[in-house]
Amino acid sequence: MGTGRCDQEATVPEPSSTAANGAPRSLAEALRARDDAALAALLHARPDLLSPVPGDVTQLATRAGTRASVVRALDRLDRFALQTAEALAVAPDPCPYGVLESLLAGTGEDAPDNGTRAALPRALATLRDQALVWGGDERLRLVRTARELLAPSASRPSPTGLGPTVAEATAGMSPTRIQEIVAAAGLPATHDPVSAVAALTGLFTDPARMSALLDEAPPEARQVLDRLVWGPPYGEVTANPAPPVRWLRDRGLLLPATTRTVVLPREVALHLRGGLAHRSPEPVAPEVAVQREHRPPLVDANAAGQALAALATVEELVKSWEHAGPPVLRAGGLSVRDLKRTAAALDADEPTAAFWIELAYAAGLLAADGEVDERYGPTPAFDDWRELPPAERWSVLAEAWLPATRTAGAVGEQDPKGRTLAALGPGLDRSAAPEVRRRVLELLAALPEGASPDPQALLDRLSWERPVRGTSELRARLADRALTEAELLGVTGRGALSAPGRALLEHRDPAQPLAPLLPEPVDRVLLQADLTAVAPGPLARPLADVLAVLADVESKGGATVYRFTPGSVRRALDGGHTASDLHAFLAEHSATPVPQPLSYLIDDVARRHGRLRVGAASSYVRCDDDSLLGEILADKRSAPLGLRRLAPTVLAAQAEPGALLDGLRAMGYAPAAESHTGDVLVARADARRTPARAKPVPVPEGPPLPDETLLAAAVRAIRAGDLAATAVRKEPEATAGGAAGAAASGELPRTSAAETLATVQAAALTGSVVWIGYVNAEGAASQRVIAPVRVEGGFVTGYDHTADEVRTFALHRITGVAELADDQV
C-alpha cells in the first residue's frame, strides 16, 4: 500500500539538504552511511532484496520498504524485537529513545524492571540492521510500511491493544462537539478545533491533571475503563448509554468511533497502563527447561538401537514394494488403502508409516516407475545403499531427513482446495521444516549432554523466536513432528541429542560416531524345532538376503524371530534355490544342528514343487501326473480359473498365468511358472527396479541465502551504481535540453553520436572519467562511470567503475555522455 510513500521515504535528498548535524534524512541516506559489512549483513538477513541486485542504494531502500519485503522481515523477528516495532508504531514519529523505552518499560519510579531496558538496545539494533528502523536515537523512525502494518485501526487491531490517538479519533467530529468535550473536561474554550484537540491531548498526557480528572470519575466509570484498557479498545453503546459511559464520553475519555461504538483514546489507555504499550513485555527468551537427565552412553546406546530399527524398517518397506508396488494415484501419491496396508506390514501406525515412506523417497530409495500403469518401486540407488555399512546407510537417511521440506505429518490434512493430502503426493512441502528441525537440534545441543528438554518449554522458546500469528503455529507443529521423527530415526535417544545427531547438526560425518555403537553383523542363527530361527543381532548381508526369502519375520526387537512355512520355502524354490542348496545353507549358518522338522518341511515342499507347470496360452497347466490334473478339475475351487483338459497331461485356463499361479497356490498346490521353451522361470527378489530417479529437491522458504561471494559482488555493484547515480557532473556548455539538462536532473545524458565520440576520445587521451548512459542488447538502460582507454572500430574500451572491471561498450548503444567534476573518481 502506498508505493508513492515508499518512494518518498527512500528518496535521496540533494547533498545540500543534509541535516546540519549529519543525521540521515531518509532511509536511503541511512543505508548509504553504512559500511560494506553492514550492507552485506542486511542483504543476508533479507535475501529477497537481492532479486535482482539493486542498481544503487536508492533502489535498495525503495525495495526494503515494499509491503511484501517488510512482511517477510517482520515474520522473522523475535518476540521482543517485534514488540519494539509495535511500540514504535504507536509512538510519535519520529520517536526519541526515551519515549520508546517508557513505552516498553513503563513510566515512574515504581515501574518494574524485568530486563526490558537492558534488552532494548539489542532489539533496536536488530530492527536497524534489517532496515526496519532508521535515524538516530533522538529521531527513531519506523519504516512507513511497517508502521501501516502494525499501527492500530478499526479494521485491524494493534497487538498492543491500543486504539487511535485523540487527534485521530476526533477527525471529522463537529467543532461544537469538540468544544463541549473540552468544557466538560474543565479546560478553557479555544477558537478552533485544532487547538481544542491539542488542549485535550495535553490534558490526557499530563499525569497529574489526568489523575485528578480520574479521581472525579464514578466507580462504575473506572470499571468501564478497566475493561477496555488492555484491549480491544472498542465497546458498543446504546442510543441512550448508562450514566458511567455518558460521564466518560462527555469528557472525551471515550470518543465515538461509529454511531454504535466508542473507543478508548490511546493517551488515556497509556496513562491507565502506566505508560506500557504491552501488558507483558518479553525481553528475554524463555529458557528451555530440562525434563530429565540421562547418562550420555545410555542416550547413545538408545539412539543406536533406534538407528538399527530405522534401517531394518526402511529396508523392509522398500523390499515389500519390489514385485508389486502400490499404484500411483491419478492426482499423485499413495492411496489411503495402500498406506493402511503398508502400515500393517510395518507393524506401525499410519503417521509413522507415512514418515518411513517419505524418508525413503527423500533418500532416493523409492520412486514411481514412470510406466503407463504407474507404480512405486525401488530405485537402482536402493541396491547401492544396501551394500553400504550400517552406519553409512543411516547417514544417508539422516542427511536426507534434515534438509527435506516434505513433511509426512501433513499427510491426511487438507489443502486450500479441500483435497486430502496423500503420502508421496503433491502439497506436502513445508519450506520452514528444515529450519525448524535444525533449530530444534540446536536447542537440544545447548542443553547439558544427555539432557532431554521439556517439550512445552521447547515450543515456547520457538514461539518466542517467531511469534507472528500463523508462522508460530506452523513452527510449533513442525517442531513437534521434528522431535518425534528425530527419536524414530535415532538422532535423539530418550529425548536427548545423541552423538551421531550432534555430528549431523555440526556438518560432520554422523557415521563415524555411530559405527562404534552398532553391533557387528552376525552370520549365525539359532534354528529351533518349532520351525523358527532366532537372529541374535543384525545379520550379515548374504545371510539376511537368503533368510528374508526363505522365512517370514514373526517378531522384531533385540532378536528377530523368523518362521519357516510351506509358502516361504516355496518362495525360496521359486527364486532358483534347490532343496540341497537350502539344506547346505542352513547347515552352514546355523549355530545349532538343523532340526529334523525343518529338513522334512524343505524336502516335502521341494518334492511337490514344480510338478505342475503354468505357461501362457492364455495360460495352461502341464503335469506328468494325469491323475493330479483330474483332481484339480474335480475341485470346485478351480471353477473361477476356467480350466479344461487339452490332453491327458495339459489343462488350458482362461486366467492369466499370474492369476493361475495364485489360484493353484491358494488351493494348496505348489506350481512353478515356465517359459515358452518349457524352462522353469526363476523369480528373483531384485528383478524389478524403477529407472534412475533424482532425489526430490527441497522447496526453499523464499529466496536462497546468498553466499559470501554473492554478497560481496552485490555490495560492490550497489556501491558502484550509487557512485554513478550520485556523482557530480561538470556543467557542460551545451544548451538546455541537451547533456546539461540531463546532468542537472540526474537523468541519463542525451548527446549526438558525434558529441559522444568526441567526448570519449578526449577522455581516452586525457585519462579522465566520464558518465555514460548505456542500453544493452536486451534493451535495459543503465548509467555507468567509465575511464576510456581505447576507442576504435565502433567500440570504446575502458575501466567500468560500476562493475569494477575492464569492459567494452558499443558506441551506438551509448545514449549520451557527460564529464564528471574534477573531484570525482
Image (cartoon, rainbow, N blue to C red):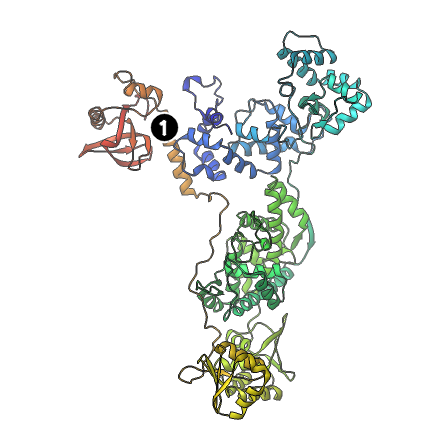
Left/right of residue 279 with respect to residue 350 in the rendered view: right
Q: Where is residue 92 in the image (x, y as percent from the top left)?
A: 60, 22
In front of the other: 275 or 65: 65
Crowding near the residue tagged with mark 1, few <14, some 14–19, many ≥20 C-alpha atoms within 10 Å? many
The x and y percentages for residue 229 are 72, 27
Q: Nearer the viewer, residue 486 or 516?
A: 486
Q: Quadrant of the C terminus?
A: top left
Q: Residue at x 66, y 8 (%)?
A: 190
Q: Name the residue under label 1.
A: 723
Q: What element carries label 1?
A: helix
Image: 692 above or below 121: below
Residue 211 place in picture, x, y as percent: 75, 19
Residue located 44% across and 58% down the image: 694
**Res 143 visible:** no
| Residue 381 position in % (x across, y down) | 45, 65
- Amino acid under label 1? Leu
Q: Does residue 455 appear left or right of residue 660 in this picture?
A: right
**The image quarter in which residue 488 lies:** bottom right
